[in-house]
Amino acid sequence: MFFGNSSISAGDQSPIGSPFGPKSEPGGASGIDLIDRKAIVTGGYSGIGIKTLRVLTAAGAEVTVPARTLDKANKALAGIEGITAASMDLGYIRSVRTLAEDWSSRNAGLDLLINTAATPSVHGGSAGRRGGVYDQCNDMAGQKNDEVKRKQA
């Protein structure tokens, strides 16, 4: 969640005890159980995104890959089990909201949101600044997970 204009410093962070580091290999997640876990990987049909989703699906996760061009995504993802491509354009917040609403209607929660897509500039600010689609996408995912946790409590 974003809290005003605050910034995060190194002192605000603490190690999570992950076995992964800067020299970890993509296949290094063997032995991790992600069965019944749901993930969204933006940019998941090329580059580091497709490598990421291959590791996630190998560990058992169900992965949704938002894509501006579904034909291109489906072609790149052919043969990878556990993947669903979904229409979304990060350049249009309405498209992001539509995906979030559709996702929420079909899923109880989101376990992983991994943003590997190049984010375009949008009206009202770039995706890298507060107010951009990137931030709004993260905020919506966080809000949905908060709602699910409240319902489960």
Image: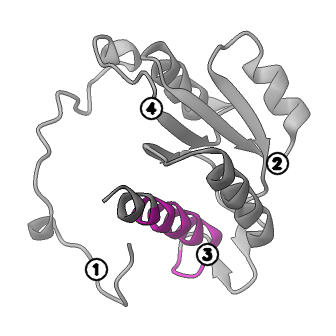
- For the record, the magenta segment spans 129-147
Secondary structure found at label 2? loop
Give the x, y percent position of residue 147.
45, 65
Q: Quadrant of the N terminus?
A: bottom left
Secondary structure found at label 4? loop
Dot 4 or dot 1, earlier in sequence: 1
* 8 versus 71 height, above or below: below
Residue nearer the viewer, 98 or 126: 98
Which labelled disc corresponds to residue 37?
Answer: 4
Q: Which residue is mark 1?
A: 7
Dot 3 or dot 4, earlier in sequence: 4
Whether residue 103 is in magenta: the answer is no
Residue 59 in view (yes/no): yes
Q: Which residue is mark 3?
A: 132
Dot 4 or dot 2, earlier in sequence: 4
Which is the main secondary structure of the residues drawn in magenta? helix
Q: Amino acid at mark 3?
A: Gly
Secondary structure found at label 3? loop
Q: CA distance from mark 4 to mark 2?
A: 24 Å
Q: Quadrant of the C terminus?
A: bottom left
* 98 versus 82 height, above or below: below
Residue nearer the viewer, 120 or 84: 84
Residue nearer the viewer, 97 or 106: 106
Residue name at image x 71 percent, y 66 percent: 97
Q: Amino acid at mark 4?
A: Arg
Residue 118 in view (yes/no): no
Whether residue 146 is in magenta: the answer is yes
Q: Are marks 3 and 4 in contact (CB under 8 Å)?
A: no
Q: Amino acid at mark 1?
A: Ser
13 vs 58, left or right, is left
Q: Amino acid at mark 2?
A: Arg
Which labelled disc corresponds to residue 68?
Answer: 2
